[in-house]
Amino acid sequence: MKLLAPHQTIQTHNEKEKFLVELFDTLYARYRSRMEYVRKYEEVVKAHGAVFFNDHIAFRTIAADGPATGIFMISRIFEALGYSSANAYEFPDKHLSSIHYQHPNPQFPKIFITQLKSWELSAASLQIIRKAFRTHRPSLTDPFLRDLYDLEGTSAASRAKLLEALVRYFEKLPWDLPHKADILALDKESQYGAWVLVNGYDVNHFTASVNSHNVDSLNDIEKLISEMRKAGIPMKKEIEGERGTKLRQSSTESAVIDVHVKDGSKTVKIPWTYAYFEIAERPLVKNPATGEMERFEGFLGGQATNLFEMTKRK
């Protein structure tokens, strides 16, 4: 059985939805190429005859001025493509806030976007961020977003150019290479902030939906973690969420890649955390208001705050 990419099973209804599938699968391709743990997970899924379905995709930003940046740097893209904000979350101990977005087609993954509130950091850390952001490339223009919004009826060539521009927006560092000393200093106060400065707006993680495996051998998070560990995948020690709760999550450890930074007048490579692969189980729970059994489609702040730590350097 050939394992389909995690968005190929989505039933699309228009050009905008087809474009989203293409965007997600293109971003997933590079992520997968860098993530041995993901490729091993795919082997586990294939061996069990299961289905790989993406629960959500996470992105990270820094909220600052000069230029103005934050969640909207990414959210405007997905709002133009049909997503709407669903809920907001605060993580005061990490100086973070997040918004998750949902698509009217429930087969599409949720989008979870976070920002670091730079003004809550020390003056030294804020200065490092402002120094990097002085070279921030221009934001996506309103006409570009209008083209995304009006995607229906455009030519295949136009859609291909839009896709290419978006992939470049996510995958190319949006500012000049940061300095090694700055990254190491910022990392001491905010590993999240240091992560963004070296990875930009690249995907932070994709997420396997445990509920969508459709086989008994992988139908809960404990079974999946056991099989992933047998496959040699290093996993987070704890599961976020007890049995019977409406959301249970865990993840692989973060992959480490070489990133380019400035060291004096030279460009050098240093190892840094890149991304992890998350797994999420959303059991059927009774809605106390209606008595109906349904799945919780949001997120729980107490669980997410621990998952942010997966990119902390060891």
Image: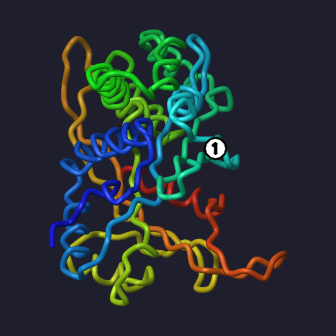
Q: How is the image coloured?
A: rainbow
Q: Mark 1 sits on what residue?
A: 99
Pick the front one: 175 or 193: 175
Q: Where is residue 287 shown, x and y percent of the image? A: 76, 77
Seen at 59% across and 64% down, the residue is 303
Which type of secondary structure does the marked residue at label 1 adopt? strand
Seen at 78% across and 82% down, the residue is 291
Q: Is residue 236 above or below residue 196?
A: below
Pick the front one: 97 or 83: 83
Q: Residue furthest bottom?
A: 216
Q: Where is residue 236 shown, x and y percent of the image? A: 40, 69
Corner quadrant of residue 225: bottom left
Seen at 49% across and 21% down, the residue is 128
215 displayed left or right of 300: left
Q: Is residue 233 above or below residue 86?
A: below
Q: Where is residue 96 shown, x and y percent of the image? A: 63, 42
